[in-house]
Amino acid sequence: MYTQSMPREIPFLKSETGFPLLLAPIAGFTGLPLRTLCREYGADFVFTELTSTNAIYYGNKRTLPIIASAPEEHSRLSIQIFGHDLKTFDYAADFLTNRGGFAGIDLNLGCCVKKVLRAKSGCYLMQEPDHVQKIFRLLRPKIKGLFSCKIRLGYDDHNQNYLQIAGLAEDEGLDFVTLHARTRSQAFGGEIDYAAIAKAARELRIPVIGNGNVRDQESLSRIVSTGASGAMIGRAAIGNPFVFQSLKAGLSGKTYAPDRAEVLAVLLRQGEAMISFHGEQAAVRLMRKGLIPYLRGFAAAARFRERLARLENAGEFHEMCDDLRREL
Ligand SMILES: Cc1cc2nc3c(=O)[nH]c(=O)nc-3n(C[C@H](O)[C@H](O)[C@H](O)COP(=O)(O)O)c2cc1C
């Protein structure tokens, strides 16, 4: 059992509503531009997209934009890593610690993408609790800030060992666990097992964050009722950073919904931030899918969605925003 003399502070647990809302790591979407907007609209904590420890180990420069962060988010950001070999975790933890610019490191134990599973990482590791324990033991003393992991219920229906893995996390001194309450075989569909979140929240002493299908007040209240310490929001935040403010308003008995002028202003800000952060060509590719939900509620949304999906350059993006302005 790992012990420490001073308990680490978990900044997001001090959310003004008493129930913190965290932005999930979402590969291809939660880069710095969306994270910045989500923070502005009330996300209490954010995560980078998953980052390969192998890529860090071999010095792959393409990982650098993924781990880039802004000073304003440092105290509320964890870098998410995935991998298998201990030597790559060892190297990545040192590399990230030397770079700094984040509050914590999150270990991905839930990814269900084939390429990640083939590399014996992500949710694959939930089948190897002994190896997971070795990773926890290796990383805990190296990570001075928050150390957390994100898990699923298990690899499939017959192997639901979330309590075992979360228990190891607690024993090895991790600060919190996020439970996406589906199995790897469910991927992103099917029911959320709220009873499992409640069970983990009851049995663990470290905070458990509930994740899965939170998109409105009703789905959020189902996570609140599990006794979890907070909720993590993924897909509902894509092209919709407002979701955090709406949900927080609801938690305080109020309502908030942006008008279309605000939505357009934020769409434009995210697009421009993506262009300056990723460069025009890469940004345009990411904008085609990452900005579509902003168009909901505009007249002729279908026509604008088509334009966005075929976006070729920054000029076309600005023309589209001008046309949207005429629809206000
Ligand atoms: C396109 C996509 C990419 C994702 N990338 C990651 C990732 O990088 N790391 C991770 O832990 N989970 C990832 N997830 C899972 C989400 O973080 C979250 O657990 C899942 O979508 C359920 O939450 P939601 O219903 O609020 O979206 C991804 C999900 C999707 C749909």
Image (cartoon, rainbow, N blue to C red):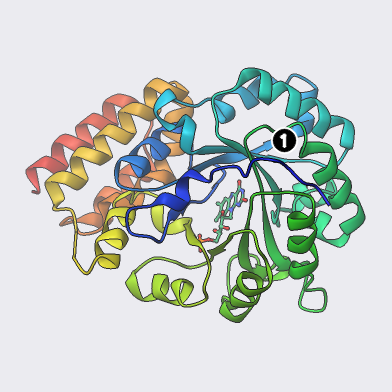
Mark 1 C-beta closer than 8 Å to ligand 1: no
- Amino acid type at mark 1: Ser
* Residue drawn at x 41%, y 47% as measured from the top left: 44
Instruction: Residue at 27% x, 25% y: name it.
Output: 315
Crowd class of label 1 (few under 14; some 14 to 19; many from 20; radius 10 Å) = many
| Relative image position of residue 148 (x, y in whole percent) | 66, 48
Farthest residue toward the bottom? 195
Q: Residue at x 49, y 28 (%)?
A: 282
Instruction: Give the side of residue 190 with respect to residue 316, left or right.
Output: right
**Vertical order, 87 against 196 (above or below):** above
Image position of 292 (left or right of 180)? left
Q: Nearer the viewer, residue 160 or 327?
A: 160
Q: Nearer the viewer, residue 250 or 214?
A: 250
| Horizontal side of residue 39 vs 156, given as left or right | left
Image coordinates of residue 67 in percent, x first then y, are 58, 28
Disc 1, SS: strand
**Which quadrant of the frame does ligand 1 lie within?**
bottom right
Residue 280 visible in image: no
Say which of 199 and 52 sits in front: 199
Give the side of residue 205 with respect to residue 68, left or right: right
Q: Quadrant of residue 92?
A: top right
From this view, report whether residue 284 is shown above or below residue 237.
above
Q: Name, please, the residue furthest toward the front.
A: 5
Kindly tell me whether residue 119 is visible in this rendering.
yes
Q: Position of residue 208 (x, y in %)?
A: 59, 62
Report how many numbered discs are placed on residues in the image.
Answer: 1
Query: Which residue was labeled with disc 1?
Result: 52
Tell which of 58 and 248 is nearer to you: 248
